[in-house]
């Protein structure tokens, strides 16, 4: 019996399998509004059989967008289209999730296909903010503004309001984005956080913003629905955030009522040295799961059915997230089920194309 295709109960929801479509930016929105591209992109992966689909990094404020084309959830007006998307995903026997995000100093950039460079205010960009006034890259035109106490309060309030809107839009999972060098991760890492107040210096101070955001989100997010946090398990840079700190953080997040820690890595600094190879981030998820005793998710260069099956079967993670491989194949779960000899539900409209059972 396949472990990848076993069910998993997370509070009031039961995932039909352990396959999750990872949040992947589409850079296709205007003023934060979703459109039919997002409906078809996410809907196709619901048809493809994933147990959970997490919508791309969705900005909690305009200045929190990575690019001007990012999705947003800073206005009640954004909710209507999201409801259409979540309704479709749900009717395909899949659960819709959303990743709430603030890009911090890595905001105000062009989409990848336009070079991804920093945009100035004359190029439809904006002033970025961060824990400290440190540029991500020396060739950037200006440093981010260091957030003051009022700015930090606004960030927390923006996440709180976004959680309320996510619930109104009928998402069933919220993931707080604390990875990839975006704002919360910038507070976590000593390489990007040189503050001397209660939000900088010690481990306890650097994790403070994330914990306050978790508390704020929980006041708006139903207690019977799962809450995820995505972390970068390590900065892959000397003197940066590391796996030991990630395990310590995961223990605290468990006590805070977080259900799953989604374990990615990197993104904090431009000089990182990532040893990229298949499954290179799985050991982070394994340590978090087994040392913090919390459900964990693995992601990163996981491309084969047997590879994903082994991760779950061997107790290295409870969920497997697929990003680029899901872009390549929206029907990846249907194919994986066939390769693993597992039963899974096909859309009625597609049943005549089902793979023949392996003998």
Image (cartoon, rainbow, N blue to C red):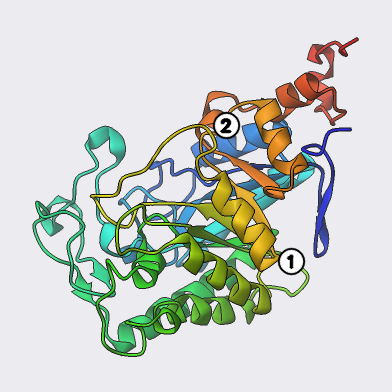
Q: Is residue 107 in view from this perspective?
A: no
Query: Depth check: 259 or 117 in front?
Result: 259
- Residue at x 79% of width, y 13% of height: 353
Indicate left or right for 227 with 56 as reference: right
Residue 146 position by quadrant: bottom left
Q: Nearer the viewer, residue 127 or 134?
A: 134
| Other-residue count near label 1 (Cα within 10 Å), few / some / many at <14 / 14–19 / ≥20 | some
Residue at 49% across, 73% down: 159
**Residue 348 spot, x, y in % from top left:** 84, 25
Mark 1 residue element: loop
The image quadrant that residue 238 belongs to is: bottom left
Q: Residues within 10 Å of mark 2 (few under 14, many from 20)?
A: many
* Residue 326 disc label: 2
Q: Is residue 239 above or below residue 17?
A: below
| Disc 2 element | helix
Picture quarter with the C terminus: top right
Percent position of residue 133, x then y = 18, 72
Q: Residue at x 59, y 24 (%)?
A: 329
Give residue 9's position: percent from left, percent from top.
83, 56
**Residue 150's image quarter?**
bottom left
Number of numbered markers: 2
Residue toward you, 161 or 317: 317
**Which of the image's four quarters has the N terminus?**
top right
Residue hosting label 1: 225
């Amino acid at each position: 019996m396949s472990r990848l295709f076993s069910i998993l109960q997370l509070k009031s929801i039961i995932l039909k399998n352990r396959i999750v479509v990872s949040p992947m930016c589409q850079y296709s929105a205007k003023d934060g509004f979703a459109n039919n591209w997002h409906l078809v992109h996410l809907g196709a992966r619901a048809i493809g059989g994933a147990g959970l689909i997490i919508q791309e990094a969705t900005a909690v404020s305009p200045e929190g967008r990575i690019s001007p084309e990012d999705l947003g959830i800073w206005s009640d007006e954004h909710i209507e289209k999201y409801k259409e998307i979540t309704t479709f995903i749900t009717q395909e026997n899949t659960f819709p999730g959303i990743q709430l995000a603030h890009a911090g100093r890595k905001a105000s950039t062009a989409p990848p296909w336009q070079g991804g460079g920093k945009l100035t205010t004359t190029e439809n960009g904006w002033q970025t903010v961060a824990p400290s006034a440190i540029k991500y890259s020396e060739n950037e035109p200006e440093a981010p503004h260091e957030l003051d106490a009022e700015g930090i309060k606004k960030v927390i309030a923006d996440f709180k309001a976004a959680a309320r809107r996510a619930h109104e839009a009928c998402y069933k999972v919220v993931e707080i984005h604390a990875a990839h060098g975006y704002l919360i991760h910038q507070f976590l890492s000593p390489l990007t956080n040189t503050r001397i107040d209660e939000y900088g210096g010690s481990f306890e101070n650097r994790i403070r913003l994330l914990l306050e955001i978790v508390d704020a989100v929980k006041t708006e997010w139903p207690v019977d629905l799962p809450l995820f946090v995505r972390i970068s398990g390590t900065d892959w840079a000397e003197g940066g955030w590391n796996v030991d700190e990630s395990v310590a953080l995961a223990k605290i997040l468990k006590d805070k009522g977080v259900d799953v820690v989604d374990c990615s890595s990197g993104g904090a600094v431009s000089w990182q040295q990532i040893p990229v190879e298949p499954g290179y981030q799985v050991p982070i998820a394994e340590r978090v799961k087994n040392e913090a005793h919390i459900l964990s998710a693995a992601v990163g260069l996981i491309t084969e059915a047997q590879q994903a099956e082994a991760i779950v079967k061997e107790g290295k993670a409870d969920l497997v997230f697929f990003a680029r491989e899901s872009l390549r194949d929206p029907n990846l779960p249907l194919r994986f089920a066939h390769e693993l000899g597992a039963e899974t539900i096909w859309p009625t409209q597609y049943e005549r194309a089902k793979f023949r059972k392996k003998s």
